[in-house]
Image (tube, rainbow, N blue to C red):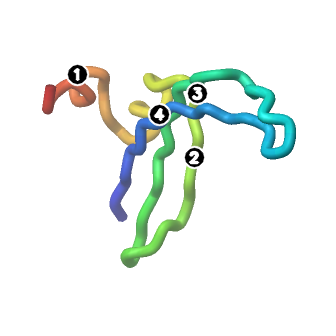
Amino acid sequence: MGRINAILRLNMSGRASGISLGGDIPATNVWDLADGKIRRVRIFLDRREALEAAGLSEQDDHADS
């Protein structure tokens, strides 16, 4: 089984009204893969929690920087 971490910034607004729904929100998705298919998607608003869920540390997060 593999995992993908997707680091996102959400900027949402109402389709008809155009009203902003929270502005620029950081989020991280952890996708669990098995047999080449997505088996589970977990959504985190706390990056550290997402890294822990993926079995990574903050040091791993900055390894490619």
Residue at point 50%, 31% (across, down) = 9
Callout 4 amino acid: Ala
Which circle, 3 or 1, is nearer the viewer? 3
Graded by Cα atoms within 10 Å as few (under 14), some (14 to 19) or many (20 or more), the crowding at tag 3 reads some
Residue 33 % position (x, y):
42, 64
Mark sitting earlier along the chain (1/2)? 2
Image: 12 above or below 40: above
Looking at this view, is 27 or 40 the one in front?
Answer: 27
Label 3 and label 1: CA atoms lie apart by 19 Å
Estimate the spatial distance between the alpha carbons at disc 4 and disc 3, rounded to whole Å: 8 Å
* Separation of marks 1 and 2 at Cα, in angstroms: 21 Å
Q: Can you give x and y, in whole percent of width and height, for residue 36 in the image? A: 37, 75
The reply to whether the C-beta atoms of the residues labelled 4 and 2 are less than 8 Å apart is: yes
Whichever of labels 4 and 3 marks the residue nearer the N terminus, that label is 3
Disc 2 marks which residue? 42
The answer to which of marks 3 and 1 sits earlier in the sequence is 3
User: In this image, 2 relative to 42: left or right?
Assistant: left
Q: CA distance from mark 4 to mark 2?
A: 8 Å
Give SS at disc 4.
Answer: helix
User: In the current view of this chain or complex, which residue is farthest to the left?
Assistant: 64
Contact between labelled residues 4 and 1, with CB atoms less than 8 Å apart? no
Tag on residue 45? 3
62 relative to 6, above or below: above
Q: Amino acid at mark 1?
A: Gln
SS type, badge 3:
loop
Taking the spot 73% from the left edge, 35% from the top edge, the residue there is 13
Mark 4 vs mark 3: give the one in front. 3
* Residue at mark 1: 59
* Amino acid bearing label 2: Arg
Residue at which label 4 appears? 50
16 on left or right of 42: right
Name the residue rendered at 39%, 44% in the picture: 5
